[in-house]
Amino acid sequence: MVMEELYYTESHEWVQLNGDLATVGITDFAQSELGDIVFVELPDVNSRVSAGEPCGSIEAVKAVVDLISPLSGKVEERNGDLDDTPDLINKSAFDEGWLFKVRISSKDELANLLTAQEYSKLIEG
């Protein structure tokens, strides 16, 4: 499933923009490839993240992968529910399984993200 209104990265994060606040998660494709997610390390509130740089990790039964920030800015909120129930990502990648929210420092970085159509081609290829 690819949601039309979101932006995507080649490393399988999604971004929902609301003004200059971006909600970040991993895609349904990514969670299905990873399998059962057992632990999530998220960036701390008030920390700064940089586009294209690791800012945490996602641990599944099969593998541990870096969480790559799609945009630069200051972390405003993290999904604390994932501390106790990281499998929310498996159950609801686009809703309850969101990861963190970042106040972006430059909307210009959106040009580096993929549209839903571009992301669909990436995962189908």
Image: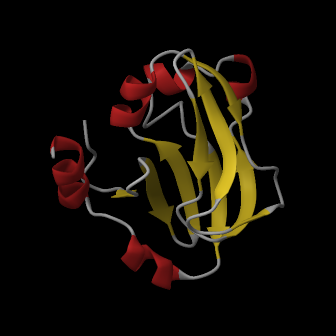
Residue at point 74% right, 18% down?
84
Q: Give the farthest residue toward the front.
A: 63
Q: Hey, which quadrant is residue 54 in on the image?
A: bottom right
Q: Considering only vertical position in the picture, is 121 above or below 65?
A: below
Q: Considering only vertical position in the picture, is 52 above or below 81?
A: below
Q: Is residue 85 left or right of residue 90?
A: right
Q: Is residue 71 left or right of residue 74?
A: left
Q: Quadrant of the N terminus?
A: top left
Q: How far across and down, in percent of the image, does residue 96 sit?
A: 53, 30
Give 98 or 32, whichever is nearer the viewer: 32
Q: How far across and down, in percent of the image, does residue 38 sit?
A: 63, 17
Give 43 or 16, whichever is nearer the viewer: 43
Q: Considering only vertical position in the picture, is 41 above or below 34?
A: below
Q: How is the image coloured?
A: secondary structure
Q: How far across and down, in percent of the image, does residue 50 sit?
A: 66, 69
Give 89 or 68, whichever is nearer the viewer: 68
In this rendering, the count of numbered labels is 0
Residue at point 53% right, 32% down?
97
Residue at point 47% right, 35% down?
95
Q: How far across and down, in percent of the image, does residue 77 sit?
A: 73, 50
Q: Is residue 81 left or right of residue 33?
A: right
Q: Considering only vertical position in the picture, is 47 above or below 124?
A: below
Residue at point 63% right, 62% down?
53
